[in-house]
Amino acid sequence: MKKIIPVIVVLIIIAVSIIILRKVLRPGEGMTPSEKARSIVLNKIKENVQDALDSADRDFSASAQEIAKQGVASETTRAILNKLVESHPFIVDCCIVDTTGIMIIVEPENFKSFEGSDIHDQEQVQKVQQTHLPVMSKAFNAVEGFQAVDIEYPIMSSGRDFIGSLSMLIRPDSMLVDIIKPIIKGVPVNVWVMQKDGVILYDRNKEEIGRNLFSDDMYKPYGNLRALGHEIIENETGIGSYTFLSDTMKEAVEKQCFWETTGLYDMQWKLVLTSQLSGAEALKGSKESIRYIQKKLREFLQRDDLHAALLTQNDDKIKECFRNFYDDYPYIYSIQWTDTSMVGRFGIPPEHSLTNYNYRESREGFDERNEAFMELVENQEPVVVEKDLLEGDRAIFIIEPVMYEEIYLGIIYIMILK
């Protein structure tokens, strides 16, 4: 019996550990509908980033083989390098590095001045020379004068001798903004990207790019963010929350985040999608309370100052009107405006609102949701519906058309969390 008890204790510990690990490693389980929606957004970003890296890798491999056949210093090498740069907008330059670590050919033309530069002391150059395997570097300050990531691909002769490497230099911030920005356009989320040593490769706030999450003074007051950073590095995927400055960088707010991992070879990038959790708490309202707030919204839509602001598209005045309504009824989650062109213009508070979100733009995984909402706008009829949010849980939408005489100005709607 004494032998059995320790075994039971061990089994309990293992079971609890599995439950904890599942929460971190398999975030899809137990998610609310809105959390799943945000997870879809993040996975779309991951897919596009990985596709871009994989596509470049395939072209890189084929180019290295072609250069090996022609010779590293052949007349066709420059044409091959230029084709790579033209095929992938995020590539800054491509070059041939000889066996001693000298950049002997660099393209395009405006980077030729760097020919002859000695980069033998760079970690990724030493690694490809030692292993004869492709490698992706950490972010570093390139001789070209900016923070970059280098992908080195070995060039092997027909006799399998190492005769140099093909180098592709990319600016990760430029690559990532082109992928991330269209996907989250108008959605109240942010995305930042970190490599495994804590260096920030991309953030909407450019001031953070290049800083280290674990050592930079900006992050030292936020212990739970740095602690979560270690979890993000240790786990492929997960969900967490932390406190850090808002998008305006003026006040500390609580944020929820999801993360995924992407990368090339043995280098990993951590993609972190965040949404702000602060704001008005929802009312668990009855039918009577819904009818009451609907009545107040209809009265609000008769205001002359609101009509004037909408007709002239005076965003500041509209936001001022919205703010007054929101302050009068602090239990609502947000009040927003979608115009007749199917653009969710903005709302109050902004962290719970879509901003210049175009419902007509195709967003994989959201087409059906967008179609349903566009139908509500086109119907020009008041309606109360329940829908899932990207930034919160299930919400009651109280939707009212806005008319000035015979002019239809779109819909204004409020949301109350269930």
Image (spheres, rainbow, N blue to C red):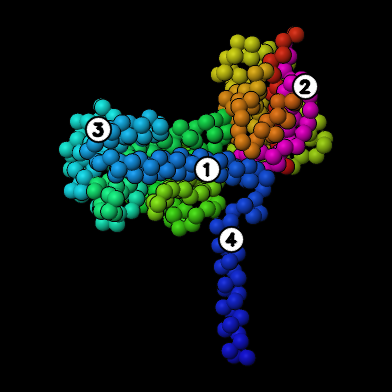
* Distance in Å between CA atoms under marks 2 and 3: 64 Å
Q: Going from the N terminus, do you reach mark 1 or mark 2 first?
A: 1
Q: Are marks 4 and 2 in contact (CB under 8 Å)?
A: no
Q: Residues within 10 Å of mark 4 (few under 14, many from 20)?
A: some
Local secondary structure at mark 1: helix
The one nearer the camera, 176 or 90, is: 90
Q: Are marks 2 and 3 in contact (CB under 8 Å)?
A: no
Residue 379 tag number: 2
Q: Which residues are magenta?
A: 377-404
Q: Going from the N terminus, do you reach mark 3 or mark 1 first?
A: 1
Tell me if residue 84 can be seen.
Answer: yes
* Distance in Å between CA atoms under marks 4 and 1: 22 Å
Q: Residue at x 57, y 33 (%)?
A: 187
The one nearer the camera, 129 or 217, is: 129
Q: Going from the N terminus, do you reach mark 4 or mark 2 first?
A: 4
* Distance in Å between CA atoms under marks 4 and 2: 44 Å
In this rendering, is residue 372 above or below 311?
below
Q: Is residue 350 left or right of residue 215?
A: right
What kind of residue is marked 2? Answer: Asn
Front of the two marks 4 and 1 = 1
The one nearer the camera, 310 or 323, is: 310
Residue pointed to by mark 1 = 47
Q: Going from the N terminus, do you reach mark 3 or mark 4 first?
A: 4
